[in-house]
Image: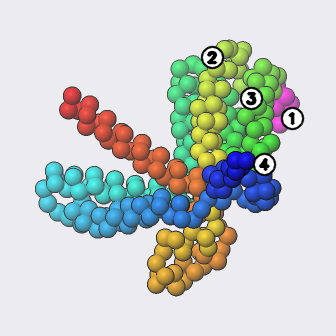
Amino acid sequence: AAARPQPCRGCWPQPSEKKQRAGEPRMLAAEVLARSVRPIVGTISLCLAALVPCTVGAFAPGEVRRRGLWRRGFTGFSFAVFVSSWIFSGTVGFLSVFMMFAVVAQNEYYDMVRRNGINPTWKLGLLGSCAMYVAAACPSVAMREAAFPLTGCATIIYLLLRPGFERCYGRLFPWYTPRDTPPTTYDDVGTTFMGVFLFGYMPSFWVRLRGIGPMAPAALLPAIVPPRLRGCAPLVALERSRSDLLTAGALVQWWTMLAIVFADVAAYFVGKRF
């Protein structure tokens, strides 16, 4: 009888391995992640080193054209260091800065819409977008999925009953002067949901991506830091901590943004040349 082929272990998870891994967190191998972390550390180090001559050349007296080139280099390298620090600043730091940028952009969009004679419910849109960012950072799947529908329901109810809400505010708060809000139009509804979708729901997936694949510093640092440097006090404290500075999603974000930068720069020079 022909020998029964043995399953290739390591090629496909066996049932026993599935049961064993059922309760374990999904952590990627430190050796594989180290290959992505080492170029990031090298790039940030080169940017920090390049900031020294760029700073001297940008702010030293000399020819205006030459100083302009140094200032462009200073701006580019500073931005690279800032964005890298922002991505690897942990969930709270990343969420705070990201929310600030998104709220400023969404407020500018609603201000442009109001200047064209449209009356979106911009305050409720901003609150709904912030709620979606916070929900995206939460571990609860139900909360992440419910943030957008709940924001939409609250927004459409307020838009339909907006004149009545204004009168209720005037009766409840004597110091409040009800505004003469015109009837809700399709443009009001469309621009409100456009702002919530473009500046709230879609960017919230960057926050979700940031939290994928948490990595323990104690498992990753030995693979990327030489033994001599691991005795430094900051690295020892980081290795003993349970911080979420390093995640697989943060690595994907860094490489994605690097690809976007290279694509934009290449598009600029190719378009300028041809």
Q: Earlier in the sequence, mark 3 or mark 2?
A: 3
Residue indicated by mark 3: 152
- Would residue 118 appear left or right of 23 to someone viewing this image? left
Taken as a whole, is the magenta stretch helix, strand or loop?
A: helix
Q: Secondary structure at mark 2?
A: helix
In this view of the protein, which residue sits in the foreground, 84 or 114?
84
Circle on res. 172: 1
Residue indicated by mark 4: 140
- Would residue 96 appear left or right of 228 to someone viewing this image? right
CA distance separating discs 1 and 2: 29 Å
Q: Give the magenta range.
A: 167-174
Circle on res. 187: 2
- Residue 160, given in percent of the width and then of the height, sits at 78, 20
CA distance separating discs 3 and 2: 16 Å
Q: Are marks 3 and 2 in contact (CB under 8 Å)?
A: no
Type of residue at label 1? Answer: Leu
Q: Earlier in the sequence, mark 3 or mark 4?
A: 4
| Rendered view: 107 above or below 5 | above
CA distance separating discs 1 and 4: 37 Å
